[in-house]
Amino acid sequence: MLRRSLLATAALLPAFPALAHPNQAPTGAEAQRMIDEVTAFRAKLAKAVETKDFATLRASYADNFSHTHGSGKFDNKDARLVAAMAGEPLIEAAPASELVFRVFAGPTVILTGKSPILNVKEQKPYDFRWVCVYVTAASGWQLAASQATRLAPPA
């Protein structure tokens, strides 16, 4: 009897997709508000990196944060905090250009940009194209994931 009920319920599920309302990406003033908030959050994060403000840094990265370096090395939140406290060059604090914000429901903002990052061993900056994913948490915006790709020098 239970099996028949489950099968009957499962048979009805395809009839209900019209009842589902997918989240719509914010537009207009709401999207601009989110961009402004993420811009302010990025400035706060950059200052925390520069001043080695551990409490702000810890709160700024999502617990399941991940970063993939241009070399392929992978950092989790703890490794990123260690790098920030050690003063390693991070995209979070580098000057940025070519910024493109994409706003999604969630709220989530994906930001791409380009930054010069110092190679400490060579004492030479290289341009990196990067992507950062910002999500909201109970405490506000957090950086959930990032990835950087070193650009080839101009020919």
Image (cartoon, rainbow, N blue to C red):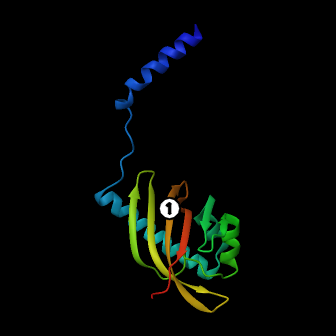
Q: 143 and 100: which one is in front?
A: 100
Q: Residue at x 55, y 54 (%)?
A: 138
Count of residue discs: 1
Three-letter code for the amino acid on which mark 1 is drawn: Tyr
Q: Where residue 117 appears, x then y in whole percent? A: 55, 83
Q: Is residue 117 left or right of residue 17?
A: right
Quadrant location, the C terminus: bottom left
Q: Residue at x 50, y 58 (%)?
A: 135
Q: Residue at x 48, y 83 (%)?
A: 95
Q: Residue at x 52, y 81 (%)?
A: 94
Q: Quadrant of residue 27?
A: bottom left
- For label 1, count other residues whose C-alpha is less than 10 Å away and answer few (under 14), some (14-19) or many (20+): many
Q: Quadrant of residue 112?
A: bottom left
Q: Return the residue found at the far left.
A: 28
Q: Quadrant of residue 84?
A: bottom right
In the figure, 129 relative to 145: above or below?
A: below
Disc 1 target residue: 134
Q: Where residue 129 appears, x then y in whole percent? A: 48, 75
> Which element type, helix, strand or loop, lies under badge 1?
strand
Q: Where residue 35 appears, x then y in whole percent? A: 39, 65
Q: Is residue 24 left or right of residue 49?
A: left
